[in-house]
Amino acid sequence: MNIMMLLEMASGAFPDRPAFTDGSSGQAFTYAELFEAAKTRAATVKASGASRLVKLDVSNLGTPLCLFTGSAAGIPYVPLNYRLTDEEIEALLKRVTPAYLVTEEKRAKTLGGLADVSATQTSSFVDAAGHDLEPVSEWGMDPEEIAVLLFTSGTTGIPKAAVLRHKHLVSYILGSVEFGSAEEGDAALVCVPPYHIAGIAAILSSVYSGRHVVQLPNFSPEEWIALCRKHQITTAFVVPTMLARIVETMEGESTANMPHLKNLSYGGGKMPLSVIEKAMDLFPGTNFSNAYGLTETSSTVAILGPDEHREAKQSADEAVRRRLVSVGQPLPGIEMEIRDDEGRVLGAGERGEIYVRGEQVSGEYEDRGSVIDADGWFPTRDAGSMDEAGYLFLEGRADDVIVRGGENLSPGEIEDTLLAHPTVKDAAVVGIPDDQWGEGVAAAVVAKPNETIDVAALQAWVLEHMRSSRVPQIIQVWDELPYNETGKLLRRVVKAEIAGD
């Protein structure tokens, strides 16, 4: 069991079908070309003596080529965040040496001088010239071998290297994708960073289904729209902040004019109700799916599907309608529980930490071992609740909970109330020091276009809809909230900014 077998199957079934196209340069691989290139590059990498294949660059043809080359060479693929500083990148590289590094020209020259780092330019790696060794003809099929090492964002400390073994990734693909299910002509637009688990999952799921992938290296709503129309994209994945910008760019239009876009998936952060409702109006014939997953779970573990989106949007039942901001129900093969701080399983509507269990769940870190308990459960550190029907609602990170006078307050619950106000476009709630209550509630909000936020009126709105303890004692109006490139709200930045005001 090796992810290289997914590419081998695709190459055998539809060798001449387009596999990947760089949306910037127009360079492309068919499935047969990608398969042969991976075998040839694997020989080059093995000859270098490297134990890790590192990719440090934007999304391009080198991305899928590196992923499958690592598997063919029998070493882990390690995509790094190219937005990090040189100092941060060097620190990560030292943790994965001896390394074969594929990167842009400038960094190939500087980082190639580090001990135990053999660097090559991405263009040289993709180009067949210079790779004249006999291609590898076989690769290990041990499911326990490491396929990918993904570094966490490191927002609260030193980044951890999450271990994803071949068994985890293959289990996810076999459990969620039907082989060869893409029709000839189907095309997916991928704009998530290559060092994010969603980027890895997009490559593997597209290959197994036989879908053509168009890569967008650097997201902009205008370029996303242009590529969708140019390539007649049928499937796309975005994070909530991307979808919000796409909707904003189409402000004033009654339709996106993309009848070819059959499926639009999103995930990676909380989706405001107003954004998804507008998006569904702009793309009336598109099937929307909201996916929830983590690096440590090999991507998606819960999903809100197209039918559930439509049912929730059209329902007059508030409980059903609320599911439009949920992440749906667990995938087949995934078990999920909500637990309190003492580990007790909670009932419907009760908020706690999300635990998951299943074959695709790794929960392991290099040099730190596994955090999965004796019964196979992985603590996600995400907070949430499930309704009576098993729909999961995210409430941020477990350690984001505000403890005010001994009462646990969920930032997500307060944010939902703020977002329901007609003048509020975006909201972030954090805890701040309070001499009387231990922690107080503060919020940063963003106004909708052509709207003005009245802070006192907004506090009154929260009081009307929630208990007084949940009313933010401080509300600041910002031009925009800080998000990282994968759509995660940088709550620590909000907290530091408000606390330092």
Image (cartoon, helix red, strand yellow):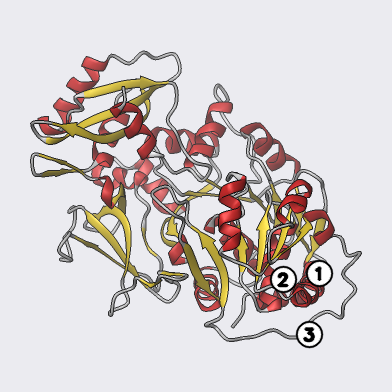
Callout 1 secondary element: helix
Q: Identify the residue at horizontal 43%, vertical 76% (top origin).
A: 359
Q: Is residue 249 above or below residue 187?
A: above
Q: CA distance from mark 2 to mark 1?
A: 8 Å
Rendering quarter of residue 316: top left
Q: Identify the residue at horizontal 54%, vertical 70% (top origin).
A: 173
Q: Position of residue 376 (x, y in %)?
A: 32, 77
User: Are circles 2 and 1 on residues that touch, CB within 8 Å?
Assistant: yes
Q: Earlier in the sequence, mark 3 or mark 1?
A: 1
Q: Position of residue 435 (x, y in %)?
A: 11, 31
**In the rendering, which numbered label is found on residue 137?**
3
Q: Position of residue 363 (x, y in %)?
A: 40, 69
Q: Identify the residue at horizontal 14%, vertical 63% (top origin).
A: 342
Q: Would residue 396 appear left or right of 473 to someone viewing this image?
A: right
Residue placed most toward the observer, 185 or 415: 415
Callout 2 secondary element: helix
Residue under pointer 1: 37
Residue under pointer 2: 69
